Image (tube, helix red, strand yellow):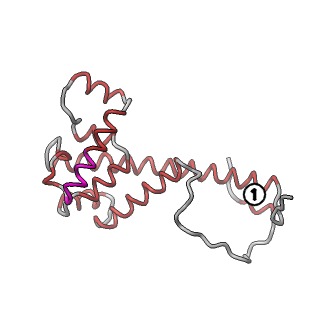
Amino acid sequence: MILFKPCSTFDVAYNIYKFDSELRKLIITELEKIEVAVRTQTAYILSSQWDGDWFTDTFHFNNSVRHARILSKIDEEYQLSDEEFVKAFKFKYSDPFLPSWITMEMSSLDTLSILYNNLLPGRVKWSIAAYFGLPDTVFASWLHSIVYIRNIYIIWKLNLLVIFFLAKTTFLSCKPTLWSTFPMA
């Protein structure tokens, strides 16, 4: 026998579903804006300070083993990419790596986060974070969190590693009209 919590109705469940759907749309829209900004600023700042293939130079990174893993991941993403600009580059050039501005566009946000975290501390790393109005350590933390949130969005059944506690009692009463106060499409 299945037991339902008090005040459980189809309308309440449906309104929660609608709220969740709208929240997901809102989150992914904003995450996409952040992702584009991170990609463009990383490519712009690092390419203007160094050269077009700066990401291949171990000199710019803290850990050479981690850097080798980043390059391997970038190469894997390059080989698997079906983006038209990547196909055009492969057809026209024989270089093993794309220029950084194309690489940043093609790479996953996770790869960008790992790459940023492995950059040597200094003016260039600070410049990227400063664009977002943050110290570099805070920006690195936020970037990692954004990757985590984005992954939850993509794999929405993913179990959260954060434990949320449920209150035994709340100031809310069982009113199905509660959900009608949320703007739904």
Secondary structure, mark 1, is helix
In this rendering, the answer to whether 92 lies above or below 131 is: above
Q: Residue 17, how many percent across, how many down?
A: 69, 51
**Left or right placement of residue 175 versus residue 51 in this view:** right
Residue at figure coordinates x 35%, y 49% from the top left: 37
Q: Is residue 120 left or right of residue 15?
A: left
* Crowd band around label 1 with a 10 angstrom C-alpha radius: few (<14), some (14–19), many (20+): few
**Residue at x 75%, y 51% (from the top left corner):** 14
Residue 67 lies in the magenta-colored region: yes
Instruction: Indicate the quadrant where residue 98 lies.
Output: top left
Name the quarter where the N terminus is drawn: bottom right
Which stretch is magenta? 62-71
Q: Amino acid at mark 1?
A: Ser
Residue at the spot of label 1: 180
Where's residue 79, x and y in %?
32, 33
Q: Residue at x 83, y 66 (%)?
A: 6
Estimate the x, y position of residue 106 in percent, counting from the top left.
33, 38
As drawn, 129 above or below 91? below
- Residue toward you, 70 or 144: 70
Q: Residue furthest top?
A: 91
